[in-house]
Image: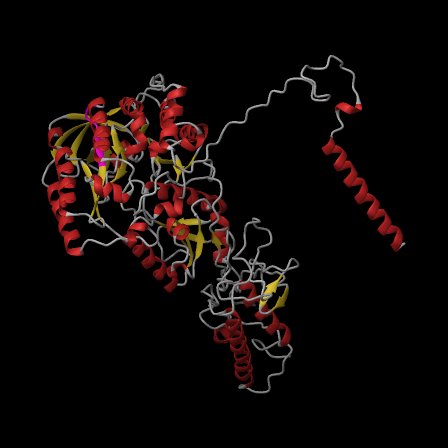
């Protein structure tokens, strides 16, 4: 037997023996890696996961070869099996406190005794952009070979059966790789050779993109916290990173790439969720991280746990929308972001989000109303409706946005203690509901503000974009709402330099902005997104695009839309803290941003409340005001119901017009079939006899079932008789 810190069951005649033994072990390990990498180049093998959802699988197997494992698929089990083989062939290892260097030699590539990282990627043992909502293979759980990160010192290692092995891939009884097998590696006085204890790690969440993405992040954060993970704001202190991504523009995806590279460089367990992995799963930046699809957010705990254990999983299958009653951790405790739907009915030539979110899928009105009531009971003061296109809501359910507004506003208190903000809508789908939208914004608990992107002021460019409306229709929407809702504010978007845009086209866009002088204009250069039709179009020279962007920005900053508020007394709703970390952010009824004096006392007094303020200064983006008094809540206030109700015929006509030529699945309510006559004899009139007879219950289907059962029993009995 070896001495303390030596090899159990192996004599150690001299000081050089342990070093020679380790060299021999490393040599065998390198040979196995080379063989595994050679096999990895030949293809991808099918994997599975015992104890997980049945849709956990990889790409289909190539039947010409029985198994062709690759680096994409070789999971932690391979590393675990290799360690198990070495242990069985050689010896068990017991490490004392004095032999820290031996541990680092045996487990190369950074597996530290006290909870460092263990990397086996080669098979060995070693911002919110402020923008409103932007505009789907199988449930892969592809397992890659990054081994487990050890837990704290002295914590026992996870144990499990690695199964039998074939061609470097560990199999369970069903001939599938068990991606979360546990392995043995207990050390005396050293670190654990295992995963971080499930539900006990620290998680950092970074979110890019629209309010819908932020809502998804809040749902995922709620599930992680509910499971026991600690959510931290310090990325360096976190064990795992959850990155929720946006694919609308190139800068967002470039920022995502930077975050992923930084995380991999620090050996963090990374799960990438959102639109980028769903719409561009083949991106090279996503090769070494776990991927979570937009409809798989209810499986974030499973994805994070397995990633922390060293696996790389892919859960990208499109499925039914996640339920709205998932636990939630809000970014702002006073704001509930409520997703109405996912996807849209459009086919814009520049839009990459369509690839990720897919076709329209709406939540039931009853589920949305229930979520609103739950949020109000939890103390929120604002509810934001979020969707890729609010105006298209409900078309797939056989309802419309007017019915949704009626249902939600019916449960809102009219004392203004809780405010509702409508989501982004495209012109073609809101045209049919302008009266209902206007009445909703006149409700005392609804902000008189809406985001209606136009993108271009030229019909020729809109047609190239396939926006499905004209400039005249956009003007109809704006004029109708501005007239029907006094003081209303409209935000819009402009894309500068779309392929084929001429100087005349740009002049028309400038004329549209000059006419309305919108309080908010989101200006963006055209970015060719891979896989979109617009990416193949001839681009406008970059110098011209930048010049047009500067021209529009200069005009937008030349007028002051909030000057008329100076000296007025307005009611505001306080819901956030400004970027300076001190001032409080409030909004008027038309959603003009008001900055109020901050500080701990004012924050405790005003956050989540409504107040009367006097505005004394205005700027391009906001106003400054002083607080006069708080507005007290009235618990006895009555609810207000909207009266604009479209007839059923009108609703049907609207849906037929909007869905003409589109692939929309209408969910029809189940209707009980009314059967006339006798179901037994087939006569047109019901039989008067009430006597029970066998003929009333015996059908062809039941007779076939009975016959099959009798046959199976007979065959089983005959087989048993032959054996005996």
Most foreground residue, 345 or 361:
345
> Horizontal and vertical percent for residue 450?
26, 32
Tell me the colour scheme of the image.
Answer: secondary structure
Work out which quarter of the rendered image holds the N terminus and state it. Answer: bottom right
Q: Position of residue 343 (x, y in %)?
A: 39, 40
Residue 190 lies, with reference to residue 480, above or below; the image says: below
Observer-nearest residue: 423 or 333? 423
Would you place residue 112 above or below residue 675 in this image? below
The C terminus - image quarter: bottom right
Considering every residue shown, the one lying at the far top of the view is 688
Of residue 236 and residue 562, the one placed in the foreground of this image is 562
Residue in the picture at 18% in, 35% down: 519
Q: Which residues are magenta?
A: 486-491
Within the magenta stretch, is there residue 488?
A: yes
Describe residue 417's horizontal placement relative to residue 51 as left or right: left
Question: Was residue 92 drawn as part of the magenta stretch in this picture?
Answer: no
Q: In the figure, residue 94 lies in which quadrant?
A: bottom right
Q: Position of residue 501 (x, y in %)?
A: 19, 47
Is residue 591 among what the camera can see?
Answer: no
Pick out the residue farthest to the left. Answer: 558
Using the rendered image of the protein, determine whether residue 94 is visible from the camera's viewpoint. Answer: yes
- Which residue is found at the position 45% from the left and 65% from the top? 117
């Amino acid at each position: 037997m070896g001495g303390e810190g030596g090899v159990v069951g192996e004599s150690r005649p001299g000081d050089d023996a342990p070093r020679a033994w380790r060299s021999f072990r490393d040599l065998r390990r390198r040979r196995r890696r080379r063989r595994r990498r050679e096999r990895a180049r030949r293809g991808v093998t099918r994997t599975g996961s015992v104890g997980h959802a049945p849709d956990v699988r990889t790409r289909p197997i190539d039947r010409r070869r029985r198994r062709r494992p690759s680096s994409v698929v070789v999971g932690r089990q391979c590393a675990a099996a290799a360690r198990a083989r070495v242990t069985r062939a050689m010896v068990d290892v017991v490490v004392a406190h004095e032999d820290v260097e031996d541990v680092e030699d045996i487990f190369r590539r950074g597996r530290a005794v006290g909870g460092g990282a263990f990397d086996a990627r080669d098979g060995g043992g070693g911002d919110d952009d402020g923008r409103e909502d932007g505009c789907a293979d199988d449930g892969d759980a592809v397992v890659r070979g990054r081994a487990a990160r050890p837990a704290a010192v002295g914590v026992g290692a996870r144990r499990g059966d690695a199964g039998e092995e074939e061609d470097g891939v560990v199999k369970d009884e069903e001939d599938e790789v068990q991606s979360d097998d546990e392995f043995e590696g207990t050390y005396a006085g050293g670190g654990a050779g295992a995963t971080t204890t499930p539900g006990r790690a620290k998680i950092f969440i970074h979110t890019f993109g629209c309010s819908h993405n932020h809502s998804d992040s809040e749902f995922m954060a709620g599930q992680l916290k509910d499971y026991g993970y600690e959510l931290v704001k310090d990325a360096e202190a976190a064990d795992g990173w959850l990155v929720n991504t946006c694919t609308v523009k190139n800068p967002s995806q470039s920022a995502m790439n930077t975050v992923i590279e930084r995380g991999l460089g620090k050996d963090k367990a990374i799960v990438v969720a959102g639109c980028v992995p769903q719409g561009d799963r083949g991106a090279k930046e996503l090769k070494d991280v776990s991927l979570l699809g937009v409809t798989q957010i209810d499986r974030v705990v499973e994805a994070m746990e397995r990633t922390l254990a060293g696996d790389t999983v892919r859960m990208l299958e499109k499925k039914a929308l996640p339920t709205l009653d998932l636990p939630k951790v809000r970014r702002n405790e006073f704001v509930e972001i409520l997703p109405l739907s996912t996807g849209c009915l459009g086919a814009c030539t520049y839009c990459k989000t369509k690839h990720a979110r897919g076709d329209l899928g709406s939540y039931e009105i009853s589920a949305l109303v229930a979520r609103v009531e739950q949020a109000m009971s939890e103390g929120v003061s604002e509810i934001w409706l979020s969707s890729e296109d609010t105006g298209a809501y409900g078309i797939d359910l056989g309802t419309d946005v007017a019915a949704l507004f009626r249902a939600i506003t019916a449960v809102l208190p009219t004392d203004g203690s809780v405010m509702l903000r409508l989501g982004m809508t495209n012109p073609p789908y809101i045209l049919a509901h302008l009266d209902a939208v206007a009445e909703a914004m006149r409700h005392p608990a609804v902000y008189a503000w809406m985001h209606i992107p136009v993108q271009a002021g030229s019909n020729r460019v809109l047609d190239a974009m396939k926006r499905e409306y004209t400039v005249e229709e956009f003007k109809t929407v704006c004029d109708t709402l501005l007239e029907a809702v006094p003081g209303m504010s409209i935000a819009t978007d402009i894309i500068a330099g779309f392929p084929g845009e001429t100087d005349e086209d740009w002049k028309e866009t400038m004329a549209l902005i000059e006419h309305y002088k919108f309080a908010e204009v989101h200006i963006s250069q055209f970015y060719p997104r891979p896989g979109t039709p617009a990416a193949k179009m001839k681009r406008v020279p970059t110098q011209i695009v930048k010049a047009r962007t500067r021209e529009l920005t200069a005009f937008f900053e030349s007028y002051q839309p909030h000057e008329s508020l100076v000296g007025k007394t307005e009611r505001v709703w306080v819901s956030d803290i400004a970027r300076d970390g001190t001032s409080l952010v409030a909004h008027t009824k038309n959603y003009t941003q008001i900055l109020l004096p901050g500080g701990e006392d004012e924050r405790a007094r005003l956050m989540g409340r409504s107040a009367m303020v006097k505005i004394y200064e205005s700027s391009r983006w906001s106003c400054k005001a002083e607080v006069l008094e708080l507005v007290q809540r009235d618990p006895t206030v009555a609810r207000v119901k909207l009266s604009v109700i479209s007839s059923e015929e009108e609703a049907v006509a609207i849906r037929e017009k909007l869905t003409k030529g589109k692939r929309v699945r209408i969910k029809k309510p189940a209707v009980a079939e009314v059967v006339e006559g006798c179901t037994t004899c087939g006569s047109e009139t019901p039989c008067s006899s009430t006597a029970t007879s066998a003929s009333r219950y015996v059908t062809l289907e039941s007779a076939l079932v009975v016959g099959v059962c009798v046959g199976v029993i007979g065959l089983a009995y005959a087989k048993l008789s032959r054996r005996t």
